[in-house]
Amino acid sequence: MAEPVAKHAKPTLGPVTAQVLLSPALLGEVLRYEPGLRLADWEDGDRAVQRGYLLVVQYAPRLAFRDTNALDVAAANGHLALVQWLHASPLHTLTGSPAAIDGAALGGHMDVIEWLHAHRVDGCSADAFSNAAASGSLDILDFLRAQYPDMLLPAVTYHEAAEHGHVSILERLPTTFAADADVPLCLMDAAAKGGHLSVAQWLHAHKLGECSHAMDYAAEGGHLELLQWLHAHGYESCSTDAMNWAANCGHLHVIQWLQANRTEGCTEDAVDFAAENGFLHIVQWLLRHRDEGETTAAMDLAAKNGHFDVVEWLHTHRDVGATTAAMDGAAKRGNLGMLEWLHTHRTEGVSTNAIEFAAEKGHVHVLHWLQTHTTAACTPDAMDTAATNDQLEALVWLHTHRTEGCTVDAMAYAAEQGHLRIVQWLHEHRSEGCTTDAMDWAARHNHLDVVHWLHTHRSEGCSSDVVDVIVRAGHLRLLQWWHAHRPERCTTNALALACEYGHVPIIAWLTAQGERTNKKAMNRAAEAGNLHVLRWLHAHRSEGCSIEAVEAALLEEHPHVFKWLCEHRRELPLRKCVRLAKQHGPSNLVRWVQNLVEQRATNEKP
């Protein structure tokens, strides 16, 4: 009889669970999503939106948003109630763009797409079609094609459907193509990547079986049945990559079939790949049945990835050897056991990369071992790399135990990655300083805290064109801070630049600040296909556009933009639009604008 368990016995934790729960690096993340987290403690607005926490977004008093695409993120994650609230909020209604419907299509969120189409003017991009195909959402694809008939169907739509195995999507798409269509090529390759025999058979039946690497891709994925079908039906799309890639992915049965039925063979990469990924049985089979052999990369990569059995077997049975990359790679992975074995049994030693790689990953125990047991040298790149990767402990160790120092890049790279504590430590303990790259790169990646600290504590400043970079990237909060604290401004027309890159929140804010522009704003938005920007400018600004906007929309294949301009911008001479459509557009667009000319003439008759 089993011994009774005490009523109040404490639950036991497995070693993995304990490691996760007690990890200092993960503790903050664990507590961040604890059900009992107080509303007042929420600060990360982007995460709250991503997870659909409507009450947090509505009421958390300290919530801050790093990015300006909250509505897009909510839509992509299918949070309809949050999308509706953000749309109604004056602070967030401008955070939507075509990416909202694009993302919702990838997630298969039909309810979100229908609501966005009915209540917003952002529209979508061609990505929405390919995203719907990738997710297998036939209802969404049908809806998009019905609501946005003027958008050219991108060829990638077919590729996504084929690669993800959605025959129903392919059956709904046209299989004959107009002269101006984006014709899909090598769809059989896409089907092979996904291992979808049913798609391959459908493509074959509809004479859409063009391919270049289909057998290689099928072999890589271990799809033997599809590989055999391609072979039987004459799809000669096989190379040495087939066996090489099968070895890389551990598909011995595919390798054996290729050996028996094909003549392409493989290269030395096959054994090297198998060794890299720890497939000792494949290494042994290839060396027994093929004569290509291996290179020093086999042992180097096996050592890097911690495959002791492969390293020991190659050391015992082969004489190709290794290079310093073996110990360097083991140092990068923090594998002290592998380092000790190689140090004892091999003679290649290490290069200057060993300390740099260990510093990059923060393996201080490896740094100490290398210092004690080898003559490993290093360069200033070690400290620069540690700074780039937020490895403060490694940075301190190098500062204390080595003399190579760092360069001005250390602070610049740390600033670029947003590692404020590293920037501060370098400022306090090193004399190399930094250049304007530090603030430039921090600004490019929207690290406002780093920018503010550099502004307060350093004197290097920034480049003259940094505000251009901020506007292109759409960093509204950073732009607002910049206007309040720094003298630099755009070197070009700021509003036109924001229009070109589709950032309505920045356009609206610059407008509120009294920023001036000209017809370039609409022209650039048209060239970029940013219909949501054109609609905003049409409603809120008066500069208008020139005929260049029409020509750009045609040349860049934005028929929906061309139609909108012709219908809504009365300063555009329609007869010139007709001429441009004849020069640059498809025949159906020419007929459309000719009909518009006739219709407008009829309406204007007394």
Image (cartoon, grey):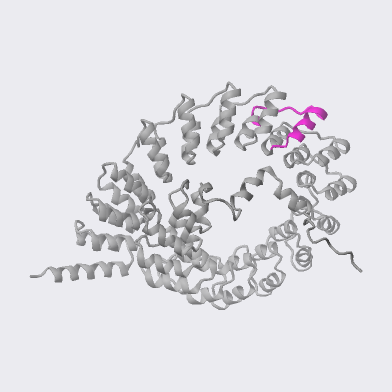
Q: Is residue 66 visible?
A: no
Q: Position of residue 120 (x, y in %)?
A: 35, 62
Q: Position of residue 94 (x, y in %)?
A: 37, 53
Is 213 situated above or below 414?
below
Q: Position of residue 580 (x, y in %)?
A: 27, 59
Magenta segment range? 362-382
Look at the image and tell me whether residue 369 can be seen: yes
Where does the N terminus fall, quadrant-wise? Answer: bottom right
- Left or right of residue 9: residue 83: left
Magenta residue check for 367: yes
Quarter occupied by the C terminus: bottom left
Quarter of the figure with residue 111: bottom left
Quarter of the image holding residue 126?
A: bottom left
Up the image or down, 499 lies above or below 172; here it is above
Q: How many marks?
A: 0
Q: Residue at x 71, y 49 (%)?
A: 20
- The answer to which of 221 and 426 lies nearer the viewer is 426
Q: Is residue 481 magenta?
A: no
**Which residue is found at the position 83% from the left and 55% from the top?**
280
